Amino acid sequence: MPNFRGKRFTNAHETMIWASKGEGAKYTFNYEALKALNEGIQMRSDWVLPICNGGERLKTAEGEKAHPTQKPVSLLHRVLVGSTNPGDVVLDPFFGTGTTGAVAKMLGRDWIGIEREEAYIEVAERRIADTRAFDRSALEVTRAKRAEPRVPFGQLVERGMLRPGEMLTSPSGKSAKVRADGTLVGDDVRGSIHQVGAHLEGAPSCNGWTYWHFRRDGKTVPIDVLRQQVRAEMAGRTP
Ligand SMILES: C[S@@+](CC[C@H](N)C(=O)[O-])C[C@H]1O[C@@H](n2cnc3c(N)ncnc32)[C@H](O)[C@@H]1O
């Protein structure tokens, strides 16, 4: 950010517009990925990032700055991880040195850049050609749990993955029986996997998927493993 002289506040921020194409339009916002980037805390709207300096700053053959307002890679990394997915196309109509294109390439996104200055186009093209894409397997970002398809517990029973009458157990030694309608029944309680778990633990809530276990081949396995299996089948992948 240019730091204007004079008796005034030091210019220390730029405003970023985060918008969708229209009311009700679908947009990508990788909330969980941004939270993960911020060590598990919801990402704030004020970002403190160092300006583009030092070795990151592109220079001409004469050692001059190749562009007056080259943006930092860290900024584009956060923008693209937060608002795009691998394979998406990112449009930057003010391409400059092509920071957007370079980071898009690293992150496995495609890009379209528009720039009117021939000198900057050359810099951007060279820069992007020299940029290496990250390993594809490292590009998958943390997704919101709700982005995963919902699998009702009853579906495990319908599919025969758990039999009506089969006993489920908890690590704390509680047990309940699976019923044909996808509910559980325990001593003085019946209801969903979550309700029965919460009741037996005397807790306000309980994640039944991790609480309840079944036995297979002498091992105790959380029922969540079966849910993951169903999700993997739905997505056409091997669990
Ligand atoms: C702020 S700079 C972009 C810097 C870029 N983000 C980077 O990291 O290098 C804006 C760029 O838009 C270009 N530009 C401005 N108006 C334009 C126009 N009408 N058509 C194409 N490019 C334009 C300028 O030449 C300048 O390089």
Image (cartoon, rainbow, N blue to C red):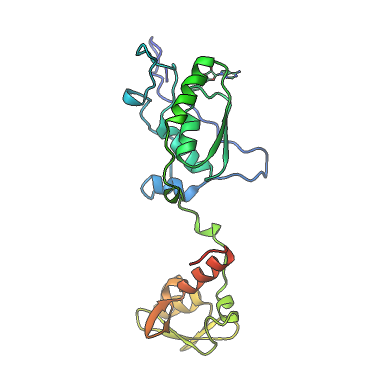
Which one is in front, 223 or 140? 140
Which residue appears at 37% of the width and 82% of the height? 219
Q: Quadrant of residue 183?
A: bottom right
Task: Indicate the position of residue 163 as horizontal and vertical percent values.
Answer: 53, 86
Task: Indicate the position of residue 103 as horizontal and vertical percent values.
Answer: 46, 35
Q: Is residue 42 visible?
A: no
Which one is in front, 149 or 92? 92
| Quadrant of the image containing the N terminus | top left
Q: How many badges with numbers are in the image?
A: 0
Give the side of residue 162 with respect to residue 202, left or right.
Answer: right
Which residue appears at 48% of the width and 79% of the height? 196
Which residue appears at 34% of the width and 23% of the height? 53
Seen in the picture, residue 64 relative to 104 is either above or below; the reply is above
Seen in the picture, residue 176 relative to 152 is either above or below; the reply is below
Which residue appears at 49% of the width and 54% of the height? 143
Which one is in front, 199 or 99? 99
Seen in the picture, residue 205 relative to 165 is either above or below; the reply is above
Q: Is residue 101 visible?
A: yes
Task: Indicate the position of residue 115 as horizontal and vertical percent values.
Answer: 56, 21
Task: Indicate the position of residue 239 as horizontal and vertical percent values.
Answer: 48, 67
Give the residue at the far left of this rendering: 54
